[in-house]
Amino acid sequence: MEKDVLKKPKKGKIFIISGPSGAGKSTLIEDALKYLPNFERSVSVTTRPKRKNEEQNKKYCFLNEDEFKKMIKSDELLEYADYCGFFYGTPKKNVESILKKGKNLILEIEVKGAVQIKEKIKNSYMIFITTTSFTELENRLKKRNTEQTEDIKNRMKTAAIELEYQKYYDCIIVNNNYNEALLNLIYILKTQGENKDGL
Ligand code: 5GP
């Protein structure tokens, strides 16, 4: 499928958004999408257990490990990676259907998957969202109360590795002030999304 996406120039462009847990990626994307009718985010598959406030097939399709491995085996994923002990992946068919509509696609994915996509689809645009302080990340994770203490520690350890990947990104947004970060994200997506040089 990557070949199809690469061959047929569609108007939609792929935007990869990554950053450490607690940086505010999901909320920023959700709010930015309200102002960006020509953008859609893809639904990922994951083996992570569903949180109380999450719905099946909204942000994630929750699978067991066998189901996930089946998708890997049958080459249904554009990229996948493990993150803090669980698998996360982007189904090719979700990407294809959004791009076919001529819409820009937002992939909120971790750094290893991001690099895989960039290798396959060169003109995808990579945005890294972060804060200037680890303490702030940790505080936000504690406050959102979706992970156990051990998981938070794991996510903080992973954050240190993720920060090393910033150099591969086209742009970095520092989310210390939410409204500023949101305006920056909308501006970047709008201006880069209008630059329709196809895939
Ligand atoms: P969370 O468990 O907090 O929802 O997500 C953990 C990490 O997995 C986040 O960095 C998120 O961006 C990333 N992620 C979500 N979906 C995917 C995906 O399809 N592929 C990859 N590689 N990472 C993903």
Image: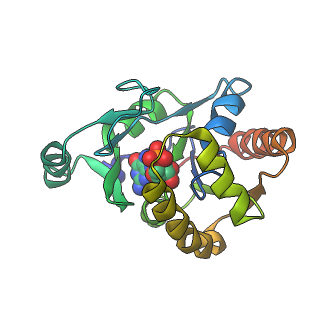
Where residue 84 appears, as percent x and y from the top left, is 39, 60
Q: Residue at x 85, y 46 (%)?
A: 177
183 or 11, which lies in front? 183
Q: Residue at x 81, y 41 (%)?
A: 178
* Residue 7 in view here: no
Query: Height in image: 52 above or below 113?
Result: above
* Residue 43 in view here: yes
> How many circles with numbers are drawn on the protein?
0
Q: Residue at x 29, y 35 (%)?
A: 62
Query: Height in image: 11 above or below 117?
Result: above
Where residue 11 appears, as percent x and y from the top left, is 57, 37
Would you say 62 lies left or right of 35 here? left
Would you say 140 lies left or right of 75 here? right
Where residue 113 appears, as percent x and y from the top left, is 43, 60
User: What color scheme is it?
Assistant: rainbow
Where residue 96 appears, as percent x and y from the top left, is 39, 37
